[in-house]
Image: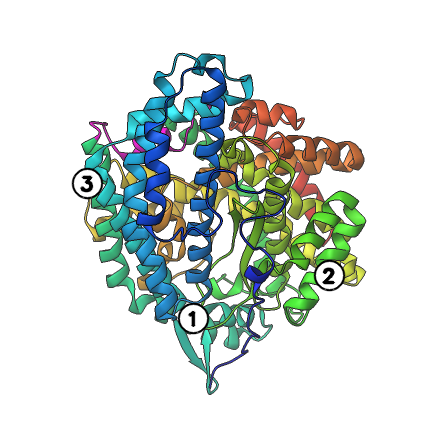
């Protein structure tokens, strides 16, 4: 028996039709099959071979190139969305893999050829100033292109799909029902400690069953990534990751500085909060199953039943927060661009994907009726607002900011939206929710430092799977919670397996730490002047990718700084709020 069967997700494709009337095609034929390389190949060849005698023809060529890129990228996004929504559908899986295996590999050399054609054109230097960040990314793309790496990227994409399927298909038996691990998570908030422990062990044991296969999968991905950097004659994969992620405002040394700052300024506050939890629960020691329940022994917050209630409640939050953002959210609702409820055969986690041709966002998540689901939807809505505010930028590149700033958009929305939680809760429940959100700040920054520190070690140190486990335990002891793992140590060494970024997006995690510092500044400003904080927030988002990371922070009224002096006062402000809502 399957628990909590969800309704079929809305068929958003009926409304988000291509080509978009608002953003019509001029170069790409309306009836083209974008999942077929042979159909799109002549268009790429025409771009490669087109004569560009002057600045005017260069500009038109760029526009046609961007239109084709948008159309093809959206095809890829649609297939990825389908694959994550329905991991057990063989036809959808085949369509996704067909694109990964037959289209993506062909795009890499074509993209390199077009990059070089642009870089070598004498009128490129005369392009508008807002083309600058894109042109720098083109230069980096040329530096990082290597024919030998194309099949490696394809193999990595296929291995990522294997990870998604493995995690999405994990289920356990609970009281006669088959439940996904996401559906088990509410049980970790139950007042009954025996129930929590039993549920935690069920989840941990199920993940533990896959430890060897996931370790082997990661080893495959690790070796492929090391080969990518070796093929480019780079010292290590860290250098490749920083170049490919266009990180020009900070270095690995700044990341290490961030780790130290978090260890000094945040970890003690995190452990102080956990010690308060231990005392409130009346325990002599905290165990892993004691971290999500209410310290006062109250049942878990259940703010809504079903995705529709969640969607409508968050709409009311945005109605109160800002009319422009509320209108954007309403547009997404009208087009059914959300798949929110957890179900068997759905990939884990949550994300916002950009449909680059129709220029609309799509939100994917796994809601199970918890407080966290409200904040996840606020988070992904922040990403969506970012895309919508920047979608009329001429260059596709400029519709996306550096990821460190993109996460400011999402994390800020969590804290800005929290002001209107009365749309879901009573005053007493709001205090509980705010306290949980504050404790999440204390938790997430050490977790970011843990993941980032682990990745730097992984990609600079030759090691075995056992050594990797031992290093994880060492780093977790440095940044992690003061929790007793005695008798269950075997589970602790592989807890990193649940972090999909380690498998699919290496080195994409420090962004969350940097962005949290930005989001806390937005929140702090909003306490003094909400209207001005929102104005600057929207201004920064609308700037898109036309500026670098530090400049985007400045445009939003924020300071870009990863050091202890910047972090400590922000954490103290959150700590003050946390103490007032006890």
Nearer to us: label 2 or label 3: 2
Rounded to the nearest angstrom, the CA distance separating label 2 from label 3 is 50 Å
Q: What residue would you read off at disc 2?
A: 313
Q: Earlier in the sequence, mark 2 or mark 3?
A: 2
Q: Position of residue 63 (x, y in %)?
A: 49, 30
Q: Earlier in the sequence, mark 1 or mark 3?
A: 1
Residue 9, numbered label: none
- Relative horizontal placement of residue 105, taking residue 330 as reference (left or right): left
Q: Which residues are magenta?
A: 232-249
Q: Position of residue 364 (x, y in %)?
A: 53, 58
Any part of residue 161 in sight: yes
Q: What residue would you read off at disc 3?
A: 462
Rounded to the nearest angstrom, the CA distance separating label 1 from label 3 is 36 Å
Does 499 appear above or below 226?
A: below
User: How many residues crowd around disc 3 within 10 Å: few (fewer than 14), some, or many (20 or more)?
Assistant: few
Rounded to the nearest angstrom, the CA distance separating label 1 from label 2 is 27 Å
Residue 345, numbered label: 1
User: How many residues crowd around disc 1 within 10 Å: few (fewer than 14), some, or many (20 or more)?
Assistant: many
């Amino acid at each position: 028996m399957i628990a909590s069967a969800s309704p079929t997700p809305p068929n958003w494709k009926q409304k988000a039709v291509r080509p978009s009337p608002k953003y019509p095609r001029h170069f790409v034929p309306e009836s083209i099959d974008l999942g077929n390389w042979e159909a799109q190949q002549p268009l790429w060849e025409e771009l490669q071979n087109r004569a560009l005698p002057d600045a005017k023809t260069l500009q038109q060529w760029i526009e046609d190139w961007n239109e084709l890129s948008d159309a093809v990228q959206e095809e890829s996004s649609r297939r990825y969305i389908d694959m994550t929504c329905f991991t057990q559908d063989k036809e959808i899986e085949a369509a996704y893999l067909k694109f990964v295996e037959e289209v993506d590999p062909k795009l890499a050399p074509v993209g390199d050829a077009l990059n070089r054609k642009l870089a070598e054109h004498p009128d490129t230097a005369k392009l508008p100033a807002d083309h600058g960040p894109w042109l720098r990314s083109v230069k980096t793309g040329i530096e990082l292109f290597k024919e030998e790496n194309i099949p490696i990227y394809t193999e990595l994409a296929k291995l990522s799909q294997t990870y998604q399927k493995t995690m999405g298909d994990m289920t356990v038996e609970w009281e006669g029902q088959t439940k996904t691990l996401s559906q088990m998570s509410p049980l970790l908030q139950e007042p009954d400690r025996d129930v929590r422990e039993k549920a935690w062990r069920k989840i941990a044991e199920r993940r533990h069953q896959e430890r060897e296969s996931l370790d082997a999968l990661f080893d495959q991905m690790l070796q492929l990534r090391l080969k990518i950097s070796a093929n480019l004659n780079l010292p290590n994969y860290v250098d490749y990751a920083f170049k490919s992620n266009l990180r020009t405002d900070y270095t690995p040394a700044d990341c290490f500085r961030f780790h130290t700052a978090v260890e000094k300024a945040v970890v003690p506050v995190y452990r102080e909060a956990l010690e308060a939890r231990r005392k409130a629960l009346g325990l002599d020691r905290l165990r892993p199953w004691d971290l999500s329940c209410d310290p006062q022994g109250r049942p878990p917050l259940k703010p809504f039943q079903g995705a529709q209630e969640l969607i409508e409640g968050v709409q009311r939050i945005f109605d109160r927060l800002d009319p422009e953002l509320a209108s954007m959210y309403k547009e997404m609702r009208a087009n059914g661009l959300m798949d929110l409820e957890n179900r068997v055969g759905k990939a884990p986690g949550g994300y916002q994907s950009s449909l680059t041709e129709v220029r609309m966002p799509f939100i994917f998540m796994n809601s199970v009726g918890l407080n966290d689901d409200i904040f996840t939807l606020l988070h992904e809505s922040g990403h969506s607002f970012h895309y919508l505010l920047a979608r009329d930028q001429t260059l596709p590149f400029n519709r996306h900011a550096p990821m460190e700033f993109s996460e400011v958009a999402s994390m800020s929305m969590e804290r800005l939206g929290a002001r209107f939680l009365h749309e879901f809760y009573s005053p007493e429940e709001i205090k509980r929710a705010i306290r949980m959100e504050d404790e999440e700040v204390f938790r997430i920054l050490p977790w970011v430092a843990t993941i980032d520190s682990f990745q730097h070690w992984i990609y600079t140190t030759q090691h075995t799977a056992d050594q990797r486990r031992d290093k994880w335990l060492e780093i977790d002891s440095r940044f992690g919670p003061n929790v007793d793992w005695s008798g269950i140590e075997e589970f602790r060494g592989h807890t990193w397996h649940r972090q999909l970024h380690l498998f699919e997006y290496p080195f994409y995690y420090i962004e969350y730490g940097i962005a949290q510092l930005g989001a806390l500044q937005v929140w702090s400003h909003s306490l003094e002047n909400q209207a001005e904080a929102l104005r600057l927030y929207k201004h920064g988002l609308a700037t898109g990718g036309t500026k670098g990371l530090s400049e985007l922070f400045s445009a939003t009224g924020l300071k870009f700084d990863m050091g202890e002096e910047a972090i400590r006062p922000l954490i103290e402000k959150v700590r003050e709020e946390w103490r007032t809502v006890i």
